[in-house]
Amino acid sequence: MEKAIEILKKNNYKVTKQRTDLIDYLSKFTVQYVAINDIVNYMRSLYPGMSNNTIYRNLKEFSDIGLVEYQEKNKTLVKYQCDFDHRHHHHFVCKNCGKVTELKACPIEFFTDQLPGYTVEGHAIEVYGLCADCTKKLKA
Amino acid sequence: MEKAIEILKKNNYKVTKQRTDLIDYLSKFTVQYVAINDIVNYMRSLYPGMSNNTIYRNLKEFSDIGLVEYQEKNKTLVKYQCDFDHRHHHHFVCKNCGKVTELKACPIEFFTDQLPGYTVEGHAIEVYGLCADCTKKLKA
DNA sequence: CCATAATTAGTAATTATTACTAATTAAACT
DNA sequence: AGTTTAATTAGTAATAATTACTAATTATGG
C-alpha cells in the first residue's frame, strides 16, 4: 500500500482518497482477477455518485504505472500487481478456480529469432488450464 | 474458398449464401485484420436488413472451426485463416502497416516446464512491433 | 416434393466504455 | 494557514460492441 502510494507520487499523480480506497480494494486481488463492474459497485458503496470515468481512468493510469494488470483474454477483468520488482512476467490462469500463477521465464527470443529485420516492441502471453490443486481435485 | 465450404460441411453447418459471401469477403483478409464493423457494413450492402446476430454468430462459428481468427489484443478485429494445415500458430502484428506475420515455432514447453502438476489446456500469444519493411522505412 | 432442423431478419435490450463540463480538491508556494 | 492552480472527480449523456428473442425463411436429407 505504502509502496503503491510512492509509485503514484513518483509518477506525479495526486493521492486522493478515491485512489487510496481503490488501491486498497484492488490489493485484495493479487492472485485472482476482479471484474471492473464489481469495482464500480464497491466504489459506489463508498462514493455513491462516483463516475465510471473516474474508475476507468484510474484503472488505466494504474496499469500504465504498473499497479494493475488487465486480463489479456477479457479486458473487463483486472488484478493488482504487487510484485513491483518484477514487472515483466506472464500469467497462467486456472479455468476452474481463477487463481493466477506468475510465469517468470519469458521466451521472447523464441519469436525474435523468427523475425529477422523486425522491430519487436511488445508481446502478450497468457496460458490457460487447471492449476495443480484443481488438477488433483478434478482427477479424483 | 472450396476448402472453406468443405470445412463448413464437415462440421455440419449449412452452406447459405450469406455464409459464402461472408467467407468470400473475409478471404481478402489473410495478412491483415478487418474490423467487425466493416464486415457488418459490407454485408449490409449485400443484404440490407442483415442482423448483427447473423454476423457475430457466424464469425464465432467460423472461429470455432478454424476459418477465422480474432486478434488477441482487440477482439473487434478478425482475419481469415487460410493455412488450414497449420492451425496452431501465433501472430506478429505490425503496429505501422497492420501486416500480420505467422509465427510457426511455439514455445509452450517453456511454460509447461514452469508449471509442474498443472494441466495446460491453451494459451494466447501475440507479438507486436514493426515488420521488416516498416523498420527500414521508419529508420530512413 | 416434403419435412424439419438450422439459419436468418428484424427489432430491442444490455453491457462496456468514452465524452464532456462544472465543481472540487491535492499539492506547491507564499 | 491562506492562496493559487492544475489535476481530479461528479454528474450526466452518448456511443460502441455485443447479445437476446421470436417469427419467417431456407438448406439439406429422405
Image: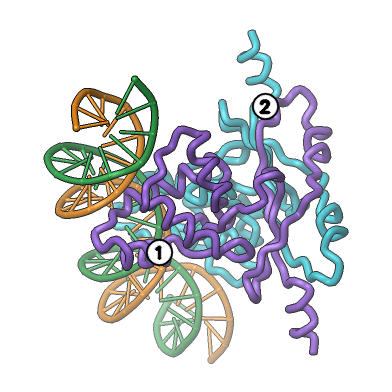
Chain colours: A cyan, B purple, C orange, D green
Quadrant of residue B86 in the image?
A: top right
User: Residue A110 vs residue A80: left or right?
Assistant: right
* Tag of residue A41: none
Q: Which residue is mark 1?
A: B37
Task: Give the percent coordinates (x, y) of residue A47.
Answer: 34, 53
Name the residue: 34% across, 57% down.
A50
Dot 2: element? loop
User: Residue A31 vs residue D10: left or right?
Assistant: right
Quadrant of residue B94 in the image?
A: bottom right
Q: CA distance from mark 2 to mark 1?
A: 37 Å
Name the residue: 62% across, 70% down.
B98
- The correct choice, above or below, for A108 with respect to D6 in the image is above
Name the residue: 34% across, 49% down.
B54
Q: Which residue is mark 2?
A: A131
- In this view of the protein, which residue sits in the foreground, B134 or A70? B134
Residue A127 seen in the current view? yes
- In this view of the protein, which residue sits in the foreground, A73 or B60? B60
Check disc 1 and give the amino acid type.
Asn
Dot 1: element? helix
Q: Are marks 2 and 1 on the same chain?
A: no
Subunit of label 1: B
Subunit of label 2: A
- In this view of the protein, which residue sits in the foreground, B7 or B58? B7
Name the residue: 70% across, 26% down.
B119
Check disc 2 and give the amino acid type.
Cys
